[in-house]
Amino acid sequence: MKPSKPTRLQDFRSSENGFQTTLYYVFAGILVAEVEFKNG
């Protein structure tokens, strides 16, 4: 079962979007951890 090119592009876009979302959550988590660490 070979995906057509538009489908592969769509998969790439959605996975890229998911990657950006993951990065955003990781970044937010690091920020929160730093703030809590500084506040003791």
Image: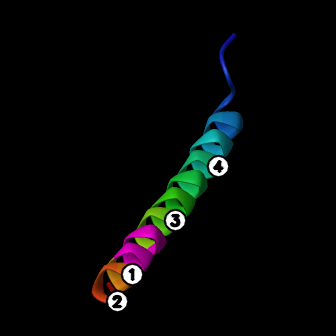
* 11 sits to left or right of 27: right
Give the residue type at disc 2. Asn
Residue at (44%, 78%) from the top-left corner? 32
Q: Left or right? Give the position of 5 relative to 28.
A: right
Image coords of residue 18 (percent x, y): 59, 53
User: Mark 3 — residue?
Assistant: 25
Q: Distance between the Cα atoms at labels 3 and 2?
A: 21 Å
Say what secondary structure mark 4 lies in: helix
Is 29 colored magenta in this rendering? yes
The reply to whether the C-beta atoms of the residues labelled 1 and 2 are less than 8 Å apart is yes
Label 3 vs 1, first from the N-terminus: 3
| Direction from residue 17 to residue 19 in the image, left or right | left
Question: Mark 4 sits on what residue?
Answer: 14
Q: Which residues are magenta?
A: 28-33
Three-letter residue code for mark 3: Tyr
Point out the tag, 3 or 4, that comes first from the N-terminus: 4
The relative height of residue 31 versus residue 29 in the rendered view (above or below) is below
Most extreme residue toward the front is 40
For residue 8, the mark is none
Residue that carries the numbered disc 2 in the rendered image: 39
Name the main secondary structure of what is drawn in magenta. Answer: helix
